Amino acid sequence: MDDLRDLYQSTILDHNKSPRNFGVPADSNRDAEGYNPLCGDELHVYLRVDAAGRIDDIGFEGSGCAISRASASLMTEYVKNQSREEVDRVFDAFHDLVTKAPKEGATPESLGKLAVFSGVREFPMRVKCATLAWHTLRAALDQTDQTAVTE
Ligand code: ZN
């Protein structure tokens, strides 16, 4: 378990240091800003959504703590080519991962690399850092012009 913890930690540190999909994708057609007042994390998520409603490309900019940046980076890798319905399903599973005790025998395998955030549940103050990117993604998909706030 300690090895797993180390692996999770190094993945988060890696994505914080070298965030993937950092920047604005070409021909971005939707975007939203997100803000987590508890920690001061700010994110701007950009999408290129195709005619079928799938996320064709995604990028982000912003500044925040290691958890918020790593979460945004891993999210952008995870949701490419997904539909709104798929994003909603992953969001629910991810939210459970960071807020609820693991169910007996259950593994967050379906979440792939996103499982690195399972340790966040031990730090309730950091849950909003981990979920900010997802709230912002959903605001961008909804094309609401409001800032997504984690409160
Ligand atoms: Zn934060």
Image (spheres, helix red, strand yellow):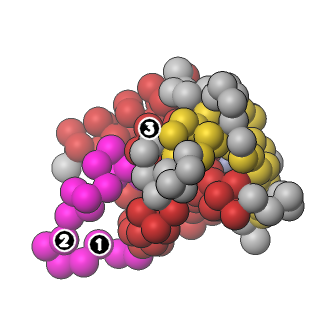
Find the residue positioned furthest to the front: 51
Query: Is any atom of residue 31 visible in this view?
Result: yes
Is residue 41 left or right of 81 when viewed as pictured?
right
Residue closer to the observer: 88 or 4: 88
Residue closer to the observer: 34 or 70: 34
| In magenta segment, residue 57 | no
Cα separation, mark 1 vs mark 3, equals 24 Å
Q: Residues within 10 Å of mark 3 (few under 14, many from 20)?
A: some
Q: Say whether marks 1 and 3 touch (CB < 8 Å).
A: no
Query: Is any atom of residue 126 visible in this view?
Result: no
User: Which structural element holds mark 2?
Assistant: loop
Q: How many labels were placed on the picture?
A: 3
Find the residue positioned furthest to the right: 146
Magenta residue span: 100-117
Query: Amino acid under label 3?
Result: Glu
Q: Nearer the viewer, mark 1 or mark 3?
A: 3
Q: Which residue is mark 2?
A: 106
Q: Position of residue 126 (x, y in %)?
A: 59, 57
Q: Quadrant of residue 5?
A: top left
Residue 77 is labelled as: 3
The structure residue drawn at horizontal position 66% and vertical position 25%, both measured from the top left corner, is: 26
User: Which structural element holds mark 1?
Assistant: loop
Is residue 82 left or right of 44 when viewed as pictured?
left
The structure residue drawn at horizontal position 86% and vertical position 61%, both measured from the top left corner, is: 146
Q: Say whether marks 2 and 1 touch (CB < 8 Å).
A: yes
